Image (cartoon, rainbow, N blue to C red):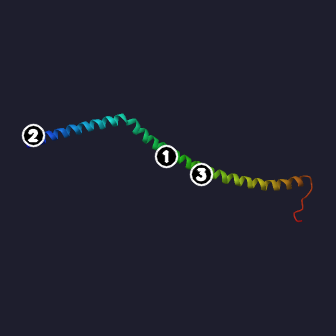
Amino acid sequence: MFFNKSKKLLEERERELESALAKLASYEKEFKDVIEKNSLLAEKITLIQEAEKKLRELNDTYQKGLDLHQTLKKEILIYQESLEISSYGLHQPQYS
């Protein structure tokens, strides 16, 4: 009698386990696209972060280059004025 009850309980538990595994398999099948999309989304986020980092680096490099360009442009203007004066045969005094 005890053996029969144990056997019935064991069989019930096995059926419940099989049912749970079947539900799990159906859920995995149903949500397979969602799971794949989440992993794809994580990859895309990583790519975006890398691109943003590279963009920041390029922007910093550009700003440094722009500052250098503006400084050199100012210096060229100083010499250009001197060249224009000397092209007329006049010399600008260097010492005042």
Instruction: State the image coordinates of residue 96 (x, y, percent, origin top left).
Output: 89, 65
At 43% across and 38% down in the image, what residue appears? 37
Q: Is residue 14 above or below residue 88?
A: above
User: Which three-letter amino acid code belongs to the residue tagged 1?
Assistant: Thr
Instruction: State the mark number for residue 4.
Output: 2
Please tell me which of labels 1 and 3 falls first in the chain: 1
Please tell me which of labels 3 and 2 falls first in the chain: 2
User: Which three-letter amino acid code belongs to the residue tagged 3?
Assistant: Glu
Which residue in the structure is indicated by mark 3? Answer: 57
User: Which three-letter amino acid code belongs to the residue tagged 2?
Assistant: Asn
Helix, strand or loop status at disc 1: helix
- CA–CA distance between discs 3 and 2? 74 Å
**Mark 1 or 3, which is nearer the eye?**
1
- CA–CA distance between discs 1 and 3? 17 Å
Residue situated in front as seen by the camera: 75 or 46: 46
- CA–CA distance between discs 1 and 2? 58 Å
Residue 25 relative to residue 86: left or right? left
CB-based contact (under 8 Å), mark 1 and mark 3: no
Helix, strand or loop status at disc 2: helix
Instruction: State the mark number for residue 33.
Output: none
Q: Is residue 65 above or below residue 3?
A: below
At 89% across and 54% down in the image, what residue appears? 85
Q: How many marks?
A: 3
Instruction: State the image coordinates of residue 72 (x, y, percent, origin top left).
Output: 75, 55
**Mark 1 or 2, which is nearer the eye?**
2
Q: Quadrant of residue 22?
A: top left
